[in-house]
Amino acid sequence: LESLSEPASPLPPKASDFFAGDDLAEIMAMAKPAAAVEAPVAEANPAPAAAAAPAPAAPKAEAKAEPAKAAAPTGEKEDEIVRVSLSRIDNLNDYVGELIVTQSVIQQQAHGGNTAKLLSAIQQMVKIAKDIQNISMSLRMLPVKPLIQKLQRVVRDTAKSLNKDVQLNLSGDGIDVDKSVLDRLGDPLIHILRNAVDHGLETTEERIAAGKSPVGKVTLSFENEGNHLVIQIKDDGKGINPEVLRKKAIEKGIIKEGQTLSEKQLIHLIFHPGFSTKAVTSEISGRGVGMDVVKTNIDKIGGHVEVQTAVGSGSTFRIQIPLSLAVIEGLIVMNGDNRYVVPLSQVQETLNIHTLKVHESKLGIGSCFELRGSIVPLISLETLLGAKPHDKESSTALVFNVEDQLIAVRVSEVVKSQQIVIKPLGNGIKPQKGWIGSCVLGDGLPTLILSPMDLLKGQVSSVFKTDEVGQGQRRAA
């Protein structure tokens, strides 16, 4: 009974008994990142200063951490991780096994063996190498489904902020695309979809007054066409009025009063930097940068954008881009003694110069010829590259479509077309406008890959942005 009547033992002292509120908060903040450094624990002990002698161990930890900080900025790009199906890895291992067997056969038949068997083994190795290439390229392929899910949220949030009812229809979410292409698709598609909801679709009241469903429809589809990915964004809104674009372009000084442009050229003014038909700038639109980003990003990956529209019915944006940026179809051309590769996807057509009626234009655009009712300037490749003229005769013209204008480039000869593997120019060479990279051809020699769109953009502004050329095109038509 006496033991029960004794007062309870006091609780152990708390940190708040020794420190004020601010001091305690500071100590707790110091303790959080110090999991690997035990020195701050000694400071929390209210012992005499002499007992805190072991505390200098902390600088050692800091000294060890400093080399890691100095080694961090190495300039190397951080490795990215891609999820790959195990079946693809298994298929790759199977083909590598077949390649090793075929290599043994070739080595055996090469030393006095059967020539027919040797040729058969070489053909088999070529086939296996092609299969390995296809599988290795597929390792970089990622599904577009995560991107589509992100775009769904963009449409939903944009429609909610504008108080519009929008139905998004999707197709082709099972398609795989190269990761480098997929990474650059996000921004262009976001801008186009926002424009479709904001500019394209009418308000609910306007749609009812026009006899349409109160719910606007936007369709996003992905499909494969050969070695290209085709993306279509379609809306059933009010469409794009070319005359409205003309008036706005004149207001902004982009075109001159009375300048003649085709309907297609007027519609493509939406891709001009700083161009917008919105009177009021908002977080969604009106700044004139959205469609410019679309055009720039799509051009960088070797694609192009087409716009089809009908006033009162809606618009369709069609984007065509290569499935992969590592391997492309290239056109090997000779210009004098120099050899270049041109991406085949950017070439509209090739023409024999000897069959063309080339003459010096009085409009100030130099050599030109007429092609299906349009005046096409003819520029030599050495002029574009700033190189010295050569003595060899130029027999072929490569026709390109740059900003909806046809321009032909004169070269000596077109050798052939083939698949090429793009390689960077290297750290020792500064990136320059007009070059995509380099490649190694069948003879083992490196060859530069041209970017005709970059080289010709400057020519478009100097050739076509005059009323005289427009009048000459009308006369030719």
Image (cartoon, rainbow, N blue to C red):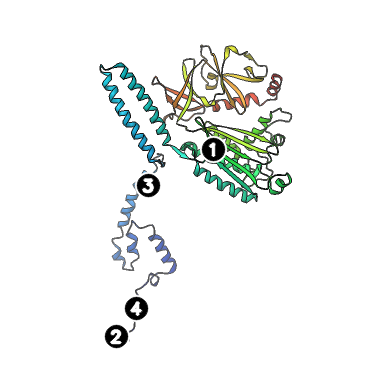
Q: Can you identify the residue that label 4 sits on? A: 10
Q: Amino acid at mark 3?
A: Lys
Q: Can you identify the residue that label 2 sits on? A: 3
Distance (Cα) linking label 3 and label 4 = 48 Å
Q: Earlier in the sequence, mark 3 or mark 1?
A: 3
The one nearer the camera, 462 or 94, is: 94
Q: Is residue 35 left or right of residue 326?
A: left
Number of marks in picture:
4
Question: How packed is label 1: few (under 14 Cα within 10 Å), some, or many (20 or more)?
Answer: many
Q: Residue at x 32, y 53 (%)?
A: 61
Q: Earlier in the sequence, mark 1 or mark 2?
A: 2
Q: Is residue 104 left or right of residue 151?
A: left
The one nearer the camera, 89 or 427, is: 89
Q: Can you identify the residue that label 3 sits on? A: 69
Q: Is residue 83 above or below residue 100?
A: below
Marks 3, 1: nearer the viewer: 1
Quadrant holding the N terminus: bottom left
Distance (Cα) linking label 2 and label 3 = 61 Å
Q: Is residue 413 above or below residue 162?
A: above
Question: How packed is label 3: few (under 14 Cα within 10 Å), some, or many (20 or more)?
Answer: few
Distance (Cα) linking label 3 and label 1 = 45 Å
Question: How packed is label 2: few (under 14 Cα within 10 Å), some, or many (20 or more)?
Answer: few
Q: Are marks 1 and 4 in contact (CB under 8 Å)?
A: no
The mark found on residue 222 in the picture is 1
Q: Amino acid at mark 1?
A: Phe
Q: Earlier in the sequence, mark 2 or mark 3?
A: 2
Q: Amino acid at mark 2?
A: Ser
Q: Position of residue 474 (x, y in %)?
A: 71, 22
Q: Residue at x 40, y 69 (%)?
A: 19
Q: Amino acid at mark 4?
A: Pro
Q: Is residue 237 left or right of residue 343?
A: right
Marks 1, 2: nearer the viewer: 1
